[in-house]
Amino acid sequence: MSRTLRLFQLMQALRQGSGPHTAARLGEEMGVSARSIHRDIATLREMGAIIDGEAGYGFTLIEDNALPPMGFRDTELEALVLGLREVQQIGDPDLVEAAGEALRKLQGRLPPRQSHRLRHSVLSAYRFQRPETPSISVADLREATWDELEVAFDYVDAKGATTTRQVKPLGLVYFDHSTMLISWCLLRQDVRVFRLDRMSQLQITEQSFRPHRVAMLRDALTKIRAEKQALQDSAASKTAEPRKS
Protein backbone atom coordinates (compact mmCIF):
# COMPACT_ATOMS: atom_id res chain seq x y z
CA MET A 1 0.00 0.00 0.00
CA SER A 2 1.35 3.44 -0.94
CA ARG A 3 1.78 5.97 1.85
CA THR A 4 -0.65 8.36 0.12
CA LEU A 5 -3.36 5.71 0.16
CA ARG A 6 -2.53 4.84 3.77
CA LEU A 7 -2.89 8.49 4.81
CA PHE A 8 -6.28 8.61 3.10
CA GLN A 9 -7.42 5.43 4.84
CA LEU A 10 -6.10 6.70 8.17
CA MET A 11 -8.20 9.85 7.83
CA GLN A 12 -11.23 7.69 7.04
CA ALA A 13 -10.57 5.61 10.16
CA LEU A 14 -10.22 8.70 12.34
CA ARG A 15 -13.52 10.07 11.00
CA GLN A 16 -15.36 6.98 12.20
CA GLY A 17 -16.63 6.95 15.78
CA SER A 18 -15.83 9.38 18.54
CA GLY A 19 -12.35 8.04 19.39
CA PRO A 20 -9.81 7.95 20.80
CA HIS A 21 -8.30 5.51 18.29
CA THR A 22 -5.12 3.80 19.47
CA ALA A 23 -2.11 3.53 17.16
CA ALA A 24 -2.00 -0.23 17.77
CA ARG A 25 -5.57 -0.74 16.53
CA LEU A 26 -5.15 1.64 13.59
CA GLY A 27 -1.93 -0.12 12.63
CA GLU A 28 -3.61 -3.51 12.82
CA GLU A 29 -6.41 -2.31 10.51
CA MET A 30 -3.93 -1.05 7.92
CA GLY A 31 -1.25 -3.69 8.29
CA VAL A 32 1.52 -1.39 9.55
CA SER A 33 3.30 -0.80 12.84
CA ALA A 34 2.15 1.61 15.52
CA ARG A 35 5.33 3.60 14.86
CA SER A 36 4.22 4.12 11.25
CA ILE A 37 0.84 5.35 12.47
CA HIS A 38 2.57 7.88 14.75
CA ARG A 39 4.54 9.18 11.76
CA ASP A 40 1.37 9.35 9.65
CA ILE A 41 -0.46 11.26 12.39
CA ALA A 42 2.38 13.80 12.43
CA THR A 43 2.09 14.14 8.64
CA LEU A 44 -1.68 14.67 8.78
CA ARG A 45 -1.21 17.36 11.42
CA GLU A 46 1.31 19.11 9.17
CA MET A 47 -1.29 18.99 6.37
CA GLY A 48 -3.80 20.88 8.54
CA ALA A 49 -5.85 18.19 10.27
CA ILE A 50 -6.39 18.92 13.96
CA ILE A 51 -5.89 15.63 15.80
CA ASP A 52 -5.97 15.46 19.59
CA GLY A 53 -4.15 12.82 21.63
CA GLU A 54 -0.73 11.28 21.95
CA ALA A 55 1.13 7.96 21.93
CA GLY A 56 -0.13 5.55 24.58
CA TYR A 57 -3.54 7.19 24.82
CA GLY A 58 -5.10 7.36 21.37
CA PHE A 59 -6.03 9.92 18.74
CA THR A 60 -9.24 11.82 17.99
CA LEU A 61 -9.92 13.87 14.86
CA ILE A 62 -11.07 17.32 16.04
CA GLU A 63 -11.20 19.24 12.77
CA ASP A 64 -10.85 18.04 9.19
CA ASN A 65 -10.12 20.80 6.69
CA ALA A 66 -10.62 18.38 3.80
CA LEU A 67 -14.39 18.12 4.34
CA PRO A 68 -16.56 20.89 2.84
CA PRO A 69 -19.12 22.79 4.95
CA MET A 70 -22.48 21.05 5.10
CA GLY A 71 -25.94 22.48 4.56
CA PHE A 72 -28.90 21.73 6.80
CA ARG A 73 -32.12 19.85 6.17
CA ASP A 74 -35.20 21.69 7.42
CA THR A 75 -35.62 19.32 10.36
CA GLU A 76 -31.93 19.72 11.29
CA LEU A 77 -32.40 23.48 11.26
CA GLU A 78 -35.46 23.20 13.52
CA ALA A 79 -33.45 21.05 15.94
CA LEU A 80 -30.64 23.64 16.01
CA VAL A 81 -33.08 26.48 16.64
CA LEU A 82 -34.82 24.59 19.45
CA GLY A 83 -31.50 23.69 21.06
CA LEU A 84 -30.18 27.25 20.93
CA ARG A 85 -33.40 28.65 22.37
CA GLU A 86 -33.21 26.10 25.17
CA VAL A 87 -29.66 27.30 25.89
CA GLN A 88 -31.02 30.85 26.12
CA GLN A 89 -33.34 29.62 28.88
CA ILE A 90 -30.93 27.54 30.98
CA GLY A 91 -27.43 28.81 30.18
CA ASP A 92 -25.18 31.19 32.08
CA PRO A 93 -24.89 34.77 30.66
CA ASP A 94 -21.99 33.91 28.35
CA LEU A 95 -23.84 30.94 26.86
CA VAL A 96 -27.07 32.94 26.50
CA GLU A 97 -25.21 35.62 24.55
CA ALA A 98 -23.42 33.00 22.44
CA ALA A 99 -26.70 31.24 21.61
CA GLY A 100 -28.26 34.50 20.42
CA GLU A 101 -25.21 35.31 18.31
CA ALA A 102 -25.25 31.81 16.80
CA LEU A 103 -28.90 32.25 15.80
CA ARG A 104 -28.11 35.57 14.14
CA LYS A 105 -25.17 34.07 12.26
CA LEU A 106 -27.28 31.15 11.08
CA GLN A 107 -30.00 33.46 9.87
CA GLY A 108 -27.51 35.62 7.98
CA ARG A 109 -25.77 32.72 6.22
CA LEU A 110 -28.67 30.48 5.28
CA PRO A 111 -30.43 30.51 1.90
CA PRO A 112 -33.41 32.94 1.89
CA ARG A 113 -36.07 30.22 2.31
CA GLN A 114 -34.34 28.64 5.30
CA SER A 115 -33.51 32.04 6.79
CA HIS A 116 -37.23 32.82 6.73
CA ARG A 117 -37.92 29.41 8.28
CA LEU A 118 -35.46 30.13 11.10
CA ARG A 119 -36.91 33.58 11.78
CA HIS A 120 -40.44 32.21 12.02
CA SER A 121 -39.71 28.78 13.48
CA VAL A 122 -42.68 26.88 14.86
CA LEU A 123 -40.53 25.56 17.71
CA SER A 124 -39.53 27.44 20.84
CA ALA A 125 -38.49 26.73 24.42
CA TYR A 126 -39.49 28.30 27.71
CA ARG A 127 -38.67 27.46 31.32
CA PHE A 128 -40.95 28.68 34.10
CA GLN A 129 -38.23 27.81 36.60
CA ARG A 130 -34.62 28.24 35.55
CA PRO A 131 -31.64 26.51 37.22
CA GLU A 132 -30.24 28.15 40.35
CA THR A 133 -27.71 30.88 39.51
CA PRO A 134 -24.15 29.74 40.29
CA SER A 135 -21.90 31.99 42.38
CA ILE A 136 -18.82 30.93 40.39
CA SER A 137 -17.79 31.83 36.84
CA VAL A 138 -19.26 29.06 34.72
CA ALA A 139 -17.27 30.37 31.75
CA ASP A 140 -14.02 29.84 33.67
CA LEU A 141 -15.10 26.34 34.68
CA ARG A 142 -15.98 25.46 31.07
CA GLU A 143 -12.61 26.78 29.90
CA ALA A 144 -10.76 24.74 32.52
CA THR A 145 -12.70 21.64 31.46
CA TRP A 146 -11.75 22.17 27.81
CA ASP A 147 -8.14 22.89 28.78
CA GLU A 148 -8.12 19.80 31.04
CA LEU A 149 -6.88 21.68 34.09
CA GLU A 150 -7.74 20.68 37.65
CA VAL A 151 -9.88 23.13 39.60
CA ALA A 152 -10.32 23.77 43.32
CA PHE A 153 -13.39 25.15 45.10
CA ASP A 154 -15.31 25.21 48.36
CA TYR A 155 -18.45 23.04 48.35
CA VAL A 156 -21.51 22.96 50.61
CA ASP A 157 -23.30 19.60 50.52
CA ALA A 158 -27.02 18.93 51.07
CA LYS A 159 -26.47 18.72 54.85
CA GLY A 160 -24.71 22.09 54.99
CA ALA A 161 -21.19 20.72 55.54
CA THR A 162 -18.41 22.61 53.75
CA THR A 163 -15.34 20.98 52.24
CA THR A 164 -12.57 22.14 49.93
CA ARG A 165 -12.26 20.00 46.82
CA GLN A 166 -9.76 19.71 44.00
CA VAL A 167 -11.12 17.84 41.00
CA LYS A 168 -10.52 16.99 37.37
CA PRO A 169 -13.54 18.59 35.65
CA LEU A 170 -14.97 16.27 32.98
CA GLY A 171 -18.26 17.78 31.85
CA LEU A 172 -21.32 19.86 32.73
CA VAL A 173 -24.90 18.59 32.75
CA TYR A 174 -27.91 20.91 32.80
CA PHE A 175 -30.83 19.51 34.83
CA ASP A 176 -34.24 21.06 35.43
CA HIS A 177 -33.32 22.88 38.64
CA SER A 178 -29.53 22.87 38.74
CA THR A 179 -26.37 22.52 36.69
CA MET A 180 -23.99 19.73 37.69
CA LEU A 181 -20.26 19.21 37.26
CA ILE A 182 -19.16 15.63 36.58
CA SER A 183 -15.62 15.22 37.85
CA TRP A 184 -12.93 13.00 39.28
CA CYS A 185 -12.51 14.08 42.91
CA LEU A 186 -8.95 13.88 44.24
CA LEU A 187 -10.22 13.87 47.82
CA ARG A 188 -12.53 10.86 47.35
CA GLN A 189 -10.49 9.23 44.55
CA ASP A 190 -13.69 8.54 42.67
CA VAL A 191 -16.25 10.07 40.33
CA ARG A 192 -18.26 12.82 42.02
CA VAL A 193 -21.03 15.15 40.85
CA PHE A 194 -21.26 18.71 42.21
CA ARG A 195 -24.02 21.30 41.95
CA LEU A 196 -22.63 24.57 40.61
CA ASP A 197 -24.87 26.68 42.86
CA ARG A 198 -23.22 25.07 45.92
CA MET A 199 -19.68 25.85 44.74
CA SER A 200 -17.69 28.97 45.66
CA GLN A 201 -14.13 30.32 45.52
CA LEU A 202 -13.36 28.60 42.21
CA GLN A 203 -9.64 28.45 41.39
CA ILE A 204 -8.09 27.16 38.18
CA THR A 205 -4.86 25.30 38.89
CA GLU A 206 -1.91 24.68 36.57
CA GLN A 207 -2.20 20.91 37.07
CA SER A 208 -3.02 19.38 33.68
CA PHE A 209 -4.65 15.99 33.12
CA ARG A 210 -4.55 16.17 29.32
CA PRO A 211 -5.28 14.11 27.28
CA HIS A 212 -7.44 11.95 29.54
CA ARG A 213 -10.70 13.94 29.85
CA VAL A 214 -12.65 12.23 27.07
CA ALA A 215 -11.88 8.70 28.30
CA MET A 216 -12.46 9.69 31.94
CA LEU A 217 -15.83 11.27 31.08
CA ARG A 218 -16.88 8.15 29.19
CA ASP A 219 -15.95 5.97 32.19
CA ALA A 220 -17.70 8.35 34.59
CA LEU A 221 -20.94 8.28 32.60
CA THR A 222 -20.77 4.49 32.44
CA LYS A 223 -20.37 4.34 36.23
CA ILE A 224 -23.24 6.81 36.81
CA ARG A 225 -25.56 4.85 34.49
CA ALA A 226 -24.65 1.57 36.19
CA GLU A 227 -25.38 3.03 39.64
CA LYS A 228 -28.70 4.42 38.40
CA GLN A 229 -29.65 1.06 36.89
CA ALA A 230 -28.74 -0.72 40.13
CA LEU A 231 -31.02 1.60 42.09
CA GLN A 232 -33.86 1.03 39.62
CA ASP A 233 -33.38 -2.74 39.76
CA SER A 234 -33.37 -2.65 43.56
CA ALA A 235 -36.56 -0.60 43.65
CA ALA A 236 -38.25 -2.92 41.14
CA SER A 237 -37.18 -5.97 43.15
CA LYS A 238 -38.69 -4.57 46.34
CA THR A 239 -41.92 -3.74 44.54
CA ALA A 240 -42.14 -7.26 43.13
CA GLU A 241 -41.61 -9.01 46.51
CA PRO A 242 -44.77 -10.89 47.63
CA ARG A 243 -46.48 -9.59 50.69
CA LYS A 244 -46.16 -11.72 53.80
CA SER A 245 -49.44 -13.01 55.10
Image (cartoon, rainbow, N blue to C red):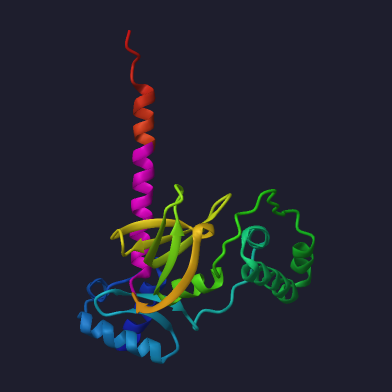
Q: In the image, residue 80 lies at what x, y percent? A: 64, 62
Quadrant of the image for the C terminus? top left
Is 106 or 125 nearer to us in this picture? Answer: 125
Q: Is residue 96 left or right of residue 234?
A: right
The structure residue drawn at horizontal position 37% and vertical position 69%, both measured from the top left corner, is 213
Is 104 or 189 nearer to us in this picture? Answer: 189
Where residue 104 sits, quadrant-wise, is bottom right
What main secondary structure does the magenta stretch of the protein show?
Answer: helix
The structure residue drawn at horizontal position 39% and vertical position 88%, both measured from the top left corner, is 45
The structure residue drawn at horizontal position 57% and vertical position 64%, both measured from the top left corner, is 135
Outermost residue toward the left in this view: 33
Magenta residues span 211-231
Q: Is residue 68 magenta?
A: no
Q: In the image, residue 153 lies at what x, y percent? A: 44, 67
Where residue 174 sits, quadrant-wise, is bottom right
Inspect this view and state whether residue 1 appears: no
Q: In the image, residue 117 lies at what x, y percent? A: 76, 62
181 to 108, vertically: above or below: above
Is 200 or 141 nearer to us in this picture? Answer: 200
Is 121 or 155 nearer to us in this picture? Answer: 155
Inspect this view and state whether residue 150 appears: yes
107 to 227, vertically: above or below: below
Q: Is residue 214 magenta?
A: yes
The structure residue drawn at horizontal position 41% and vertical position 67%, both measured from the top left corner, is 169
Where residue 52 sits, quadrant-wise, is bottom left
Q: In the image, residue 63 lies at what x, y percent? A: 47, 79
